[in-house]
Image (tube, rainbow, N blue to C red):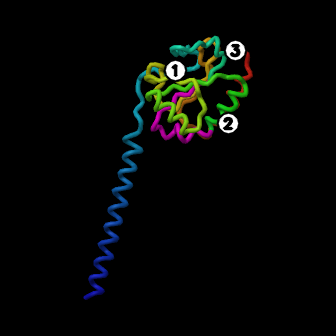
Amino acid sequence: MPNNIRANLELGAQIAIAIAVVIVAGVLVKRQVFSAPARTNAPQINAGEKLIVPNVDWEQNKKTLVFFLQKGCHYCAESAPFYGQLIAGAKNKNVKLLAILPNSADEARQYLQSLGLPIDNLQTGSLASYKVNGTPTVLFADRHGIVRSVWFGAAPEREREMRDKLDQLFEADN
């Protein structure tokens, strides 16, 4: 009798584990497939367009590296070490830095500090007003506020390409 009870308990446990695995897998698949971020039809800023940012004198800035980030964006946090490298390179080339976040100014400052990103020039506001649909977005603007290059999302495989392009832009006389 005890062996029979033990066998039934083991069978029940195995069935329960199988059901749990199926449920967890289903939830993960649903999140990945059906809850992927929706693409909006809102316009997205592109190279060649002028970036309008209140209180920024592009002529004075000459060259500006702009980071669009958002507290709670895990891609922003994952990319922070790479962005730190870009920031160090920009500072060595006298390129101005600007961070634009949709959070309050205090939250934005704390968030940048938590990521270890030393960006003093900070603006807050709706990302959509800058034609930015998601974070992270990084762009390079010239002395006229014209976007020369833009990168959307986290893409570790494109970091070298991005760094090389920025090195060219940092050195260019635009």
Secondary structure beneath disc 3?
loop
Checking the image for residue 45, the label placed there is 1
Q: Amino acid at mark 1?
A: Ile
Q: Quadrant of the C terminus?
A: top right
Q: How far across and how far down the image is residue 86, in percent?
A: 65, 32
Residue 149 showing in the rendered view: no
Q: In this view of the protein, which residue sits in the foreground, 114 or 28?
A: 114
Which residue does the image show at 40% across and 33% down from the upper left? 38
Which is closer to the viewer, label 3 or label 2?
A: 3
Who comes first in sequence, dot 3 or dot 1?
A: 1
Q: CA distance from mark 3 to mark 1?
A: 20 Å
CA neighbours of label 3 inside 10 A, class few (<14), some (14 to 19), many (20+): few
Residue most extreme to the left: 1
Which residue does the image show at 50% across and 35% down from the upper left? 110
Q: Quadrant of the N terminus?
A: bottom left
Q: Amino acid at mark 2?
A: Arg
Q: Say which residue label 3 marks.
A: 174
Q: How far across and how far down the image is residue 150, in percent?
A: 58, 25
Which is closer to the viewer, label 3 or label 1?
A: 3
Q: How far across and how far down the image is residue 136, in percent?
A: 52, 32
Secondary structure beneath disc 1?
loop
Q: Is residue 35 magenta?
A: no
Are circles 3 and 1 on residues that touch, CB within 8 Å? no
Who comes first in sequence, dot 3 or dot 2?
A: 2
Q: Say which residue label 2 marks.
A: 160
* Quarter-of-image position of residue 152: top right
Q: On the rendered structure, is 154 left or right of 14?
A: right
Which residue does the image show at 67% across and 36% down from the upper left? 160
- Residues in magenta? 65-81
